Each structure stands twice: as C-alpha cells, then as structure tokens.
Amino acid sequence: MLQITLLEQAVAEDDDLMRQFVRLVVPKMIAEYTFISAKGGRFADLRREEGLDVARYERDQSMLAHLLNGIFPTMSLVRLLAAHDIRHFSDEACKVYLAAYCMHDLDKILQTGALDTRDRPAIDRVAEMVSQELHKLDMDRFFPEYRQYLADIIFLLVNTQRQKGTHLSPHLFRFGLNRKQLPILRDLCTYSDVVTYTIRSPEEVMTSSLRERLSYLSQDQFTFAYHKLSEVRGLLTNVLNNSVMKLLKEQGLIPYLFFPNGVIYLQPHHIELAVNHNEVVETAKTTFRQICGRKISHNAPGFKFDPKGRVKKPDYYHDFLSAAEYVRMIGRMAIQMTQRDISTSPAAKMRQMKQGGLLPPEVEPFTPDLRIGALARFLINLWNQVLDPLPDDKQREQIQTQVLGRLGLTDLWPLAQQIPSRGGVDYKWFWLAAQYLAAHKGIDTLQGAGNLKDLFDDIINTLLPQITNQLEALMPGVYLPHLDQYLKETLEISGATQPATRPDFAAELAQYSAAKQPRKASLICTLCHSSYPTEKQADSSVLFQPWVYKNKLTLYAGSNAGDAAFGYDLPLSTIFDLGAKRVVDLRAHQTDKDKTLWPVRGYDDKGRPVCEFGYAFTANGFEAQRQRQLNINRMVG
C-alpha cells in the first residue's frame, strides 16, 4: 500500500516501535477512519444543528489525518527528548499513549455523544467500547496487552481535552501503569491534539498553547522557532525552504514540522539565533545551481541551433550554469544535435557564389559531410559567444591564434575572411571545417584518434583557464540577481528577520511600465507584475490537460475541444467562462434510455434540445453573445 510505504519513510530506521505501529495498525486506521470527520464536515454540521458555535471546527479534517498528524510529531518529540537525555518513555508507556490518542475522539468515531465515566459501571461500558474499537484496528498485534491498560487508556482519552468532559479523579480507575506516569502521558495526548489542528502556518506556533506544552515536556530545554516565506511558488519556495533549513540546522536548530511555506524548529535553550541574510542568499543560489544546473546540463531544455548555426537557448541558462559549463555544453551539443548533414545547403550556396565570381579564386566549394556541420556549429559559437565578446583586443587575437593553430588553419584564416556571408549565414566556418576534415581524413565524431569530441575538449581546456573570469562577467544571470531583494520581501525568521511590511511601489511600477511598453509589450504575471515568455495556444485547444489547465495564458482559441470525460459541470462551466465555443464529445447518461425523461431534462439521447412535448429542435447557427447553439422548433402545433 502506497500510504504505508510513504509513512514508513517518515519513520527513523532504528525506531522499531513506530515502524511496527505503521505496519500493523495504520492499515486498519486507513480502512476505518478515512471517511470519518474529526473536524468540519459532518461533525460540524451536527454541532451546528445542535445550535453550537462551530467556528473552531469549520476546517475539514478526516479522523485519519487528525490521528496521524498528531502521532508522528509527538513520537518524534519523544525520541528527541530521549536522545537529549531530558525525558525517557518506556515502550509500554508509548504504546498506551498511542492507543489512547487513537481513541481520544471515540465519541466522534462511534457518534455516541460524550462518553460517560461518572461511575464504575459507566467506565466498564466505555472499556468495552474501547476494547472493541482497538480490536478493529488490530491493536492486539501491536500491543497484545492493551486490555490490561484499558483504565489508563480511558483516563487519557477522556482527559485529552482540557475544556470539557474531563474526568481527573483517579479513584474509580484501576491503572496498569504507575499513576505518576499519567499526567505526562496526558500532556502527550493534548500536545498531539493541538499540533494536528491549530497550527496551519509556521508563525502560529509562537502564539499557540503548544509552547507551554513543549516547555513542560522538555523541562524548559527547548522552545519553538520558525522560518516562513510569505508566498508559495513551487520549486522556488522548495529550494528556499531547504536552503534556510540547512543554515538553521548548522546553528543547532532541529527541523520539526514542515509546511509548504516554511518550517517549525525545536531550538535548544542555550542557542542564540543569528542569521546572515547574504549567507541565506548565497546558499539558495548554490542550491539552485546544483539542482537546475544538473538538469540543464543533462537535458539541455530549449537548446537548439538555428539555420545559421547559432545557438538559441532560454535566458535562464547563465543563472544556473557557469561559463565553463556553458562553453562545454556548446561543444557537446554541436555533436549531439547534428544528426543530419546540415552542410548540404552551404555547399550548394558556395558553388553558386563560385559561379558568380563572389569567392576568391583560391576558395573551392566543398563536398557536404555530416562532420562539417558539427565542426562548423562549434566554431561559429566559439567565436560568436566566447571569443568575439572578449573586451581585450590583444587577448582576443592571442586566443584566436591559439585556436587556429590547434586546427592547423592559421594560413587559411586570411582567405576564409574573404568569403562573404549571405542571409546571415557565415559560410567561412563551413569552408574552414571542410578544410580541417580534408587534412584529417577518416576521423570520427566520437570514436578513434583525433575524433571531433576530443578536438573540442582540447580547445576548450586550452581556452578556459585564460578567460573564465572574463566569461563569467560576460554571461551574467538574469533571474538569480533578484533573489536578494525577493528574500528581503518574503522571508521571515523568528527573532532574526522580518519581511518588508510594505511593497516597493516604485519598483513594482517600474516593472509594470517596462512590461507594458508601447511596442513589443509583454504579458504580465498576475503575482509580481513582471513579464514572462508565453506562446499563443493553437486555435483549437484541448484546455483540460495538466500542463494547460489553470495556466495564466490568454485563451486565444475560438473553440475548445475535449472528449466525453469533460462533459461535466466544472470543465463545461470553465469553457463557458473563458468565452470559447464548446467542442466536447457527448457523454452517456442512464436517463438516455428513458424517452419520457427527455422533455424533463431538455435534450434527447443524441444531445439535441427538445421542447416540453419531446420534439427535437433544429440547429440554426451559433449565438456568440449567449455562447450557445441557436435552435428553432419546427413543430406545427
């Protein structure tokens, strides 16, 4: 079962007790409690019908989520307290806690109302109910002796809450544990109940009663700390969360509860938190480069060569790749992406120029070859993106000489510079590539001595030590430089940093104005007012696909297509709201077979509208204003 596998991954490898609990008890909890409301849902509806205030119960939470979200943080705290030699719990006590917390909402599970423990017979009745419910959860397999501790379990479950329905008098209970253990186990149950429902965002822990519970349980050795981002943006937020968490762990904080927008930590009382903003930024940048750079280097998304042989790539490459990594990618992709002979057209064009007298007499057209295209692409971009931008003329000429010398083309370089370009294609590189291959007959692109890959690597390894620093300055990122200001505006760390309380209006206006320039205006992100690249959707779009639905692109389609699976209210309403014509296949329904129901629902088994007498309407065009088919009734009455 997938849920069990995921939960086991959240348990420490040496935590045998929790691992057994997950394997033996949780499968039954999933089966029994997934559709029972702990908060919100049916539970809140019943309380509302009784005239009670349900404000604190309004947020939906299933019984399964309520129990697991309380058990895992609490048992993690139990292990932590033992590891720091603050407080130790026996396996026996932990099992009693687990059984009691699983039963602490027994009244909701059985829908019996408040449990009555006023006297011994009432306690015995509750004990029978608890025993039967624990048996349903296979608690016998995890905790065979649980029946010896039913009194302890009942005492804890009725006293988990602190507001009402408690029974703190111990004289009616026949405890299996030492009575002195029960107050601390009660605090564990209460801690679980609070942590699973009241903490919706990291900063809320600072105003929660959990602080007092933690102080008591840890004997004042721990307190809470947190970091929080004011917005959630997928990979960006995930990387930032991990970067901040890494820094705070290095300062001695212990990551404890995890949220989409931040983390709650346990902070030892002797640690003073000190956060360097620049360190956070640099750690985040390093993490981004590691994650994204690895993906870009491996998959080269958006990387291609245009018909002129020049590299085309997304703007973000230089944010995540170093200059050296990018130059090496050019060499690698020049071979990898040249799978067909692209030298045929340049060869033909040079023959035409030769016939027209446009080439120097010494320049002879060449015979097309796949390898010519790969080498030409490498040379075109080596000069265009690496050598030509170098600001130092002397250094540039020196390195050009080195490259030409390595290729053995130094004597041909003056002649090649006389070859004219046509239509933006620099034919000299194809000619030079052909001359190199003519002088090195039989070499392969990847294999054997003198192959093109080794040639490219040799040239790059010669150049990079001399110009890496200059290339880094010439290839700046366009997105990561904004990370500094972004973190200042969004990151909050308890007791250390606070995000800007007001947005920078001048900066927002500048971004907006830049994106809305009169010519070549960009679409604007609804979140940050910055422009972002988009492509228009096709005229007939399939809207309901994971990579299209709910995106920010304008729907340019005049119609919207979909199969019968989209013939439900949400897709149809969305298409209507977007102003597109529906082209959705018919969906079968059980009422199609009953002709007497067609006038009631308004259409026949083929989807054609019918009048109240069952006669079909005839299509008469499309009414754009009302976004529906125009129909007329030809029945003569």
Image (spheres, helix red, strand yellow):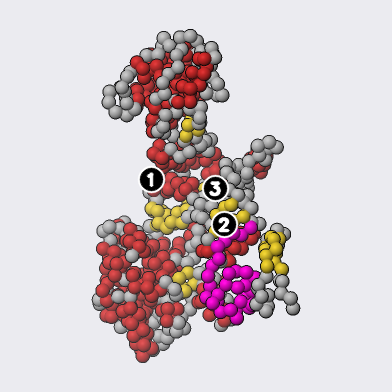
Residue 528 visible, this orientation: no
Q: Earlier in the sequence, mark 2 or mark 1?
A: 1
- The answer to whether residue 352 is left or right of residue 574 is left
Tell me the element at label 3.
helix
| Residue for badge 2 | 561
The question of residue 343 being in magenta is answered with no
Where in the figure is residue 70, as x and y percent of width and height? 40, 66
Q: Report the magenta residues as a range.
A: 581-609
Measure the C-alpha gap from mark 2 to mark 1: 53 Å
Disc sitting over residue 490 in the figure: 3
Q: Is residue 473 above or below residue 529?
A: above
Mark toward the viewer: 2 or 1: 2
Mark toward the viewer: 3 or 1: 3
Few, some or many C-alpha atoms within 10 Å of disc 1 (few <14, some 14-19, many ≥20)?
few
Label total for image: 3
| Residue for badge 1 | 250
Measure the C-alpha gap from mark 2 to mark 3: 40 Å
The kind of residue on which mark 3 rests is Thr
Q: Earlier in the sequence, mark 2 or mark 3?
A: 3
